[in-house]
Amino acid sequence: MGRATRSRSNFGSARRLPSGRWQARWTMPDGSKHTAPSTFDTKTDATAYLAAVRTDVARGTYTPPVKPQPAEVAGVTEYAAAWIAGRELAPRTRDHYRWLLDEYIAPAFGPLTEVTPAKVRTWHSGLATGPTAKAHAYALLKAIMATAVEDEVIEANPCRIRGASKAKRSRDIRPATLDELTAITKAMPARMRLLVPLSAWCALRFGECTELRRKDLDLKAGVVRIRRGVIRTTDGERHVTDPKTAAGKRTVAIPPHLIPAIRAHLRDHTQIGSEGLLFWGPRTGAQLPHSSLLWQFNQAKHKAGRDDLSPHALRHTGAVLAAQSGATVAELMARLGHTTAEMAMRYQHASEERDLVIARRLSELAAGN
C-alpha cells in the first residue's frame, strides 16, 4: 500500500489517500484538529473546502464538522468493490479479487464499522475452503481494511490473525528426475514436445512459454528473452501482459544441449515471421490453451509413472536443477524471475555471464557428467 500524498497550505492540508480520494484536515487556533466529514474526488475540491473553512473561521461562523454515523458508512461489499475498481490490477488478479469478494467476504460482513477482530476470527475459522483460497480471502479483507483505516472510515484494522495471509503448502513438490523428464518429453505430441524441456531447463512459467515468439529467441547468444506472458480470465478472454515485477522481465541463458531441439522446433512447428508463436492452438492460431497442454501432459506423465506432477512442477524442477549446478540464491532468483519488488531490486544485477555458466553446467547434468 502506497503512502498518502500530502499538499500543505497556510491553512490545513490535503492528502491523497491510498483509495485515490483526497482528504482535508486542519488545526484550529485552540489546537484542536479536525477532518472534513467526507473525502473528495480531486485535490482542487479538497483545497477549496479548506479555503471555505478558513473563511468561516475568520468570520467567526465556523461550525465543527459532524462525523457520519455508522448507518451512513458504506458496507464492506460496496467499499471493497470500489477498492478493487480503483486499482491498477492485472485482469486475472481483478477477477480473482472479485471472486473472493463475492464468494467469501460479501456474504459475511455488513457495515465497515461493525467489522470487529472477533467477527473476523469467527469468519476466518469457519471458511469452508482450501488453505490457498482461505489465505487469499483473508489477505484481501486485510488490505481493504487497511485502506479504510487510511481513509479514516474505521479507527483500526480488525484483521489481526498472525500468519493468516499465507497458505502453508499442503505437500512438497518432488521434482522430476532426468529420466522422467525424458520420458514425459517423448510422450508429448511433436508440436508440444519442446515445451517440457524448455519449461524445466529454463524454469519458465506456462504463460511465459505460450507467449514466446521467434523474436524472443537468440540462439546465437544462447538466450531466451522473457518480456510478456499470457493469461486467461474467468470470462475466457486471453490477455497478454507484462511480468508482474521488474525481475520477471528477464533474459535466461539456454542450456546448450537444448539448442538442437529448439532449432528443430522452429523449423517444423513454429509460426512463420518474427511474431510467430512457438506454441499455438491449431484451431485458433492463438496461444496454446492451458487445457490442451494439460490433457496431453497428463497422458505423458502417466506413462512416465509420475501422476503427481503438474506443468508448474517443471518450473520447480528447473529451479532444483539450477541449484544443483551451483547457482547462488541471487542467481536463482534472477533466473526464475520469482521475487517481490524489494527482492527484485536486490537481485536484478545478477551477472549474465554467470547465468551462462549455470546454463553450461545444466547441460553437463543432462549429459550425466
Image (cartoon, helix red, strand yellow):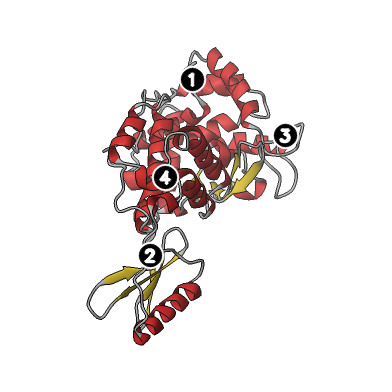
Point out the frontmost of discs 2 and 4. Answer: 4
In this orientation, does residue 73 appear?
no
Q: Closer to the N terminus: mark 2 or mark 1?
A: 2
Q: CA distance from mark 1 to mark 4?
A: 54 Å
Vertical order, 68 against 271 (above or below): below
Horizontal side of residue 215 vs 245, given as left or right: right
Q: Amino acid at mark 2?
A: Ala
Point out the frontmost of discs 3 and 4. Answer: 4
Please tell me which residue is depicted at 50% across the width and 49% down the height of the picture.
84
Name the residue beneath numbered marker 4: 111
Q: CA distance from mark 2 to mark 4?
A: 24 Å
Closer-to-camera residue (16/284): 16
> How many marks can you see?
4
Q: Amino acid at mark 4?
A: Pro
Element class at badge 3: helix
Q: Position of residue 268 (x, y in %)?
A: 72, 34
Element class at badge 2: loop
Q: Closer to the N terminus: mark 3 or mark 4?
A: 4
Name the residue beneath numbered marker 3: 268
Q: Amino acid at mark 3?
A: Asp
Q: CA distance from mark 3 to mark 2?
A: 55 Å
Point out the frontmost of discs 3 and 2. Answer: 2
Closer-to-camera residue (44/246): 44
Name the residue beneath numbered marker 2: 4
Q: Closer to the N terminus: mark 1 or mark 3?
A: 1
Point out the frontmost of discs 1 and 4. Answer: 4
Residue 317 bears which disc, if any? none
Q: Residues within 10 Å of mark 1 (few under 14, many from 20)?
A: some
Closer-to-camera residue (2/266): 2
Q: Quadrant of the C terminus?
A: top left
